[in-house]
């Protein structure tokens, strides 16, 4: 870790576990691509977005100079905070269709493990490092064992499980998908995940008695992120906020160039993306102090996946897949590290402390 701008900054992580865990994205590309396109087809039928998802500033679609079209959706950069917005609303219909219809079973298929070994392998490889980063970041400010934790948008409970394994005792997760919560509770062996309706999110946040709230890959999926953050700020019990969000990164440009490969960064449930600028706006707007940030991306893994899938599509290039693998895989981590250190990664984890 290094110190930069009065906060702890960590960069990058090894890609080997990600390549193994995401093999399904390679093998079942067309299925995932079809699902994301179905979600996009619902999204483009929603009303036009009038205000930025991050800062709530008015969007001037006609005069926005930095716009592009991807899978039929127009996107643009907010001129006020630098956030990347899709130009349709995350309406009630859209969110219910994506996240809670059939109790969230369809959406949860991407994240649910088929057995306990697979579940805890994912916890160890992906979520334990994130939990350790949170606790390490907290350790200079508080005794993390004495704190209460709530994980919002807990999904199948991977992050909750990782924190429990790391020694956290006082923790509960909240999730809108019953299918994911039920699956996670079975895997964990305890009822640590509670199901709630989307409509109850704000009231729960305002009333919870917790020192630390985590939202790992959540803020980009909620209808009104600013209202969520307003509620968090108004709850004086909450001292720390741990966020993980996807970023406007090189991944997006790869997806433009390879439209027939599964779109992971800006598609489906990701209708908007954060930038370093829009995160700084959040920090200032909600009177928070950044404690730490871990910048790491999957941009080079996604480039490798995009080219691999495309090579396999054509009979004339299929025999070159192994050569491409030998050539590129050894370069992934070093190339990704350069991107991460420029704060251009596809993901960042940040711990904030609310100021008194």
Image (cartoon, helix red, strand yellow):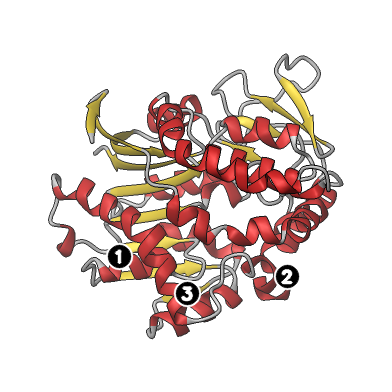
Earlier along the polypeptide chain: callout 2 or callout 1?
2
Q: Which mark is residue 118?
A: 3
Q: Which mark is residue 163?
A: 1
Quarter of the rendering occupied by the N terminus: top left
Q: Looking at the image, do the residues carrying marks 2 and 1 touch, with CB atoms under 8 Å apart?
A: no
Viewer-nearest of labels 2 and 1? 1
Q: Residue at x 77, y 43 (%)?
A: 317
Residue 50 lies left or right of residue 213; in this view the side is: right
Res 164 quadrant in image: bottom left
Q: Which mark is residue 101?
A: 2
Whether residue 354 is visible to the viewer of this picture, yes or no, is: yes
Residue 109, given in percent of the width and then of the height, sits at: 64, 70
Secondary element at image label 3:
helix
| Closest to the observer, 100 or 33 | 33
Secondary element at image label 1:
helix
Q: Residue at x 63, y 23 (%)?
A: 78
| Closest to the observer, 103 or 237 | 103
Q: Residue at x 30, y 51 (%)?
A: 236
Q: Is residue 300 above or below residue 131?
A: above
Residue 125 lies left or right of residue 49; in this view the side is: left
């Amino acid at each position: 870790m290094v110190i930069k701008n009065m906060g702890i900054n960590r960069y990058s992580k090894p890609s080997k576990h990600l390549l193994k865990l995401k093999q399904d994205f390679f093998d079942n590309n067309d299925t995932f691509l079809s699902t994301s396109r179905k979600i996009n087809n619902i999204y483009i039928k929603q009303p036009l977005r009038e205000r930025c998802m991050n800062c709530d500033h008015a969007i001037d679609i006609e005069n926005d100079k930095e716009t592009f079209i991807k899978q039929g959706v127009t996107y643009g950069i907010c001129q006020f905070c630098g956030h990347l917005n899709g130009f349709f609303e995350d309406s009630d219909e859209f969110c219910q269709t994506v996240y809670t219809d059939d109790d969230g079973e369809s959406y949860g298929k991407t994240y649910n493990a088929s057995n306990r070994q697979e579940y805890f392998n994912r916890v160890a490889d992906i979520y334990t490092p994130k939990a350790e980063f949170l606790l390490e970041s907290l350790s200079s400010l508080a005794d993390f064992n004495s704190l209460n934790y709530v994980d919002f948008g807990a999904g199948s409970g991977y992050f909750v499980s990782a924190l429990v394994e790391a020694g956290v005792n006082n923790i509960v997760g909240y999730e809108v998908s019953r299918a994911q919560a039920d699956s996670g509770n079975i895997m964990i062996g305890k009822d640590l995940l509670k199901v709630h309706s989307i409509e109850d999110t704000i009231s729960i946040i305002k009333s919870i008695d917790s020192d630390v709230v985590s939202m790992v890959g959540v803020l980009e999926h909620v209808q009104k992120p600013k209202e969520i953050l307003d509620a968090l700020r108004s709850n004086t019990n909450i001292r720390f906020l741990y966020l993980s969000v996807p970023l406007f990164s090189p991944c997006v440009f790869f997806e433009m160039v390879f439209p027939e490969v599964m779109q992971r960064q800006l598609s489906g449930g990701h209708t908007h993306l954060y930038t370093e600028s829009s995160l700084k706006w959040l920090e200032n707007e909600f009177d928070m102090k950044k404690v730490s940030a871990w910048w790491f991306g999957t941009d080079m893994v996604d480039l490798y996946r995009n080219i691999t899938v495309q090579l396999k599509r054509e009979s004339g290039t299929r025999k070159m897949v192994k050569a491409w693998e030998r050539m590129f895989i050894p370069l992934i981590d070093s190339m990704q590290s350069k991107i991460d250190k420029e704060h251009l990664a596809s993901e960042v984890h940040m711990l904030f402390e609310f100021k008194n």
